[in-house]
Amino acid sequence: MTDETRDATMSIWRGTKTGGRFETYTVPMVEGMVVLDVIHRIQALRAPDLAVRWNCKAGKCGSCSAEINGHARLLCMTRMNTFAPGEEITVSPMKTFPIIKDLVTDVSFNYEKAKEIPAFKPKPKEADGTRRMYQEDIDRVQEFHKCIECFLCQDTCHVIRDHEENKKAFAGPRFFVRLAALEMHPLDTNDRLELIRQKAGLGFCNITKCCTEVCPEDIHITDNAIIPLKERIVTEFYDPLAWVKRRVLSKGAQQPGPGEPEPPSAKA
Amino acid sequence: MATASGVRRIGDRVERKDLWWVEPLIYVVVLGGFVVYATWASLANGNYYADPYLSPFYSPCLAQNCVHPTLPLLGSWWNLSPAILIVGSPLAFRFTCYYYRRSYYRGFFRSPPACLVPDAPKTYSGETRFPFIIQNLHRYTLYIAVLVLVVLWWDAIEAFNFHGHFGIGLGTVIMVANVLLLTGYTLGCHSARYLVGGYLDSFHKASLRFRLWTYSNRLNVRHNRWAWASLVVVGLTDLYIRLVAMGVIVDPRWIS
Ligand code: SF4
Ligand code: SF4
Ligand code: FES
Ligand code: FES
């Protein structure tokens, strides 16, 4: 059997922020290729100016995110043998972010959101000069640290994908993962609940789980990060019994920041 | 939906080639069908007791007029269906359940119908405003659901009691299966998992809460399956008892 067994046909979106269209390319392909390999072949043989972002080719740098046949995927982790022979494969850039060129998008929205999250602030050291964490506590947050920042979850989240106006008030699933990692951290002392409710807009998420479906690191974004955060927000702002309990123990409710509306439970 | 930043210049064409519309359609058919059946069965006010089986839609039965009262809190003046008094609590529990929310937001509200398929509604505020902000009270429906669950366990035990003699009929098996599925569904609830221990940042000095949280997590991983299985079986339990009460089928009994 020869190496060059069959052709791959790909319809790739070509253009810039002012507009563009899908172009179809056919190149020979060999056994074991992934979509990114085929795109590199198209660059080599048909379209040297085709723009695509990639680095590791191992599913670990999170650079090569795109939409393949309408699914948010890593180009380097999508094997060609998952498609029917001869099938025309559609590849387009992530649609939630502004396009720079072809398959490359401007993901700075995410970097701006990242800056809004207060950093880890550890507890004081214990008497012997160390800080201790226990395995069972670390196991829970470990999952969140697997994130490779591919932003596929951000791309797939309908809150910002279909409603551009929500971008201001919504951080997106990747940052709920980050916030959960910090909020559930046994040593962290920063309180980010008001931020999560208000600025990060957790309430916009309707837990439809598309972020979880696309995460290449298999992080249970909705079940393990978003919903537990929602439950913490309920206790802090919506649960009347929790509010009474706080009053009785007189710890007092969270004060809203300047310009932020009163939390609903404060009016109860 | 072309936007200022050029985000959707590629267009709203759905690039998915799979049968993405099948899943939301199933949600509409199954959830819609269940609501229709549950409403009809709760209003029927008859054929809900086939000695010793009591339909879960009529339990606890709180009126004196019940064929088989659990706790006759309401006098004989209540002559509407006794199911009306209680059927709201399991429905509220399921309506505010995180998993069902996902399913009906996809199926009925089409926001989104499927991943990377555009939302049907033009504007979207998620669960930040009325009415969906009420979803935040899901844990209260859980409290009531746990009480109802205790009653349903009692009913399942009663289903072994054939006029003072121990027995097992097909109805007994169905009622036990029903209450087991409801228990798996209820204890794997996301709010339950939070309340038994998930609220802690450190489990180190809370080994009981850690254990409870771990058990609840185990059920929670397949909360979707528990949700569907318990939904279908609770409907079938009512249907079975109804058919036996109507005399359409005879309950097979192995010991009695
Ligand atoms: S579950 Fe929430 S955050 Fe994740 S994609 Fe859906 S709406 Fe967005
Ligand atoms: S959470 Fe998953 S999908 Fe989202 S950025 Fe991280 S790795 Fe990518
Ligand atoms: S190239 Fe690094 S994840 Fe694909
Ligand atoms: S019952 Fe499903 S999350 Fe509570």
Image (cartoon, coloured by chain):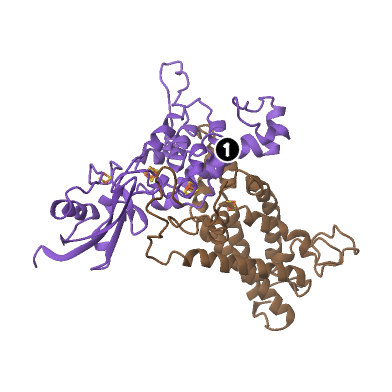
Q: Is residue B47 left or right of residue A85?
A: right
Q: Quadrant of residue B228?
A: bottom right
Of B196 and A209, nearer the camera is: A209
Q: Quadrant of residue B48?
A: bottom right
Name the subunit of mark 1.
A
Residue on which the image places disc 1:
A232
Specify the chain shown as purple.
A
Give the color of chain B as drawn. brown
- Residue occupying the point 57% across, 68% down: B30
Q: Residue furthest left?
A: A2
Image quadrant for the C terminus of chain B?
bottom right
Asked if residue B19 is positioned above or below residue A172 in the image, the reply reads below
**Badge count:** 1
Of B48 and A212, nearer the camera is: A212
Q: Is residue B57 left or right of residue B69?
A: left
- Residue occupying the point 49% across, 51% down: B218
Of A72 and B214, nearer the camera is: A72
Q: Amino acid at mark 1?
A: Arg
Q: Position of residue A86 (x, y in %)?
A: 23, 68
Asked if residue A57 is positioned above or below residue B53 in the image, the reply reads above
